[in-house]
Amino acid sequence: MAKKIAVVISGAVSLGSYEAGVMYEVINALAYHNSKAPDEASQFKIDVIVGTSAGAMTAAVLANQLLFAPQGLSQKETNALYQVWVKRTRIEDLLKDGPGDAPDKSILSSATIRALGAEFLPDPSPTPVTPHIAADSNIQLGMAMANLNGIDYGIKTLSKHDFTYTHFEDQLIRNIDGQNPTGANWEEIRKTAIASGAFPFAFAVSAILREKADYDPVNLETPFSADDTATFTYCDGGMFDNEPLGMAKGLVDGIDNHNNEDNRFYFFVCPHSRKGDSTPLAKYNADSATMGITGLRIVNAIMANAAFQDWVDSEQVNQDIKLLDLRAAQLAALVAGGLDLVPSAALVQELVDKFIPDKTEQAATIELLGKQYAVECASIAKSGMQNQETIFLQQILILQKAADLMEKDLMYVIDITANETEELGGSGFHSFVGFCSETIREHDFQVGRAKALAFIANNTIGLDKSYTPADGTPPPTKPVPGISVAPRDVRQQFYDRLTQRVGIVIKESSAPWYLKLLGGTIASVIVDALGVKKALDL
């Protein structure tokens, strides 16, 4: 069986061009490696792709291309990701209202994004084709969203009171079968990819019909119709899950059944390097904490938590598993040194029976642990100690159960990231600046290529390091193009559009009438306070 790769693509806004560059080289490098591999076991195959916000569109396009249009991925000019993120997502088009757009619904045109979705996420031909050599025959596709209606779940407390909590973090997970092109609902996938990337206020929210089967049925209280469907309203998935490693891990567990951690890799693609967001006390403290400054810190805290939470969870699990492995090695060394486990056999079996009453499940679990701890078992057997291995594995099972690690594995995460403020031209104004200039997007695409090539050249997972890109080495990534490369009139149109739409929000709000009369002036003050003029160099 081939080694497996789960691709995790973060939110990025216009820096989707960086992620497109990374995936362009990663896919071609995998194709090069697999074409030279002596057997299937030496190959790498992508079988999971998850994304959020801009990464959701990238994930969906990538899955579609890998399984149903693989010939378009090898060359830059025909590559769908390059076309979407570098050539076609232009501020000039985003400023033109189309069908369904309305001044009070969004700042930019959602119709433009829907048109791109229709073009680059088409319904596949019903005739199967041979998948890309870098892809498995099936791909699990996952996209994160923010459900603004929310999903209610009920809990009964010990005092018998009902407690309801609402879950706003949502996702769509679909199996894409390369041999059954009509098996997936691509209209649903298109809508989800667009909704996941609907940055609040910039793009309109989306309505998506969901199935009850997509949600955990335990204590589910949200009503669904007689046909077990319901329509919800969605926007940017990055609000709650900007780096969906947890979603990828859940999909991997369903595929690997916790039995392939040594041959499972996670490629994490993100234009933002992982830095802390703490603020020194000298810069923010109780004395300086005005409401405005505090509001910005709260927003920053929420967004930072959304970005890091899956990293925190995965790293904690990794540390716990490493500690368990250390204890297993120490116990094996004691047994190999003469510690007899046989006197404890009856007590150990009693504990195992309590943890796993089913004997068949017990045997399967012990067999799996035997594979995971084969080195330790071999050292015990080599020592000459008799009848020890099964008791040793039973004790490891007890430790796993006690630490809640029975269904957890090490995650080998390979991050391909950039320092967006120093290396990427499109990072300004919450990463919207890149939409203003193809020069900026092209630069960021090339930075993505360079980062992927650096990973390939220095990788330690067994990818062929002799790969060289068909398009040649990326051009120098310094200097980084600034916003001034975009025509001034385009930047001014962006500024004017933003100011106009903020003014509409003020006029439709519950503000006093005299403030509404000054809506345009107040809007300019607000936009300027957000640093938009500086970001656009106006």
Image (cartoon, rainbow, N blue to C red):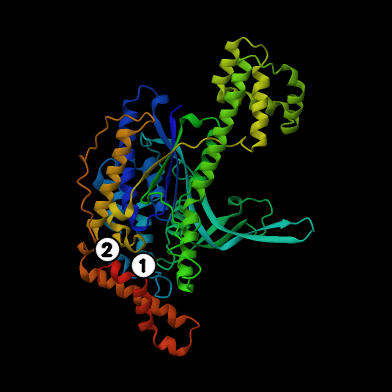
Locate residue 356 relative to residue 113 in the image: left or right: right
In x, y percent, where is residue 311?
49, 46
The amino acid at mark 1 is Ser
Give the labeled residue for mark 2.
Answer: 436
**Label 2 crowding class (10 Å Cα cut-off): few <14, some 14-19, many 20+?**
many
Q: Is residue 224 visible?
A: no
Locate residue 443 relative to residue 299 in the image: left or right: left
Q: Name above or below for residue 267 compared with residue 171.
A: above
Residue at the far top in the pictured view: 384
Going from N to C along the chain, the mark reached first, 2 or 1, is 1
In x, y percent, where is residue 12?
38, 55
Give the labeled residue for mark 1.
Answer: 109
Q: Name above or below for residue 357 compared with residue 236.
A: above
Residue occupying image coordinates x 42% and y 62%: 199
The amino acid at mark 2 is Cys
Labels 2, 1: front one: 2
- Quarter of the view holding residue 354: top right
**Label 1 crowding class (10 Å Cα cut-off): few <14, some 14-19, many 20+?**
many
Residue occupying image coordinates x 60% and y 36%: 407
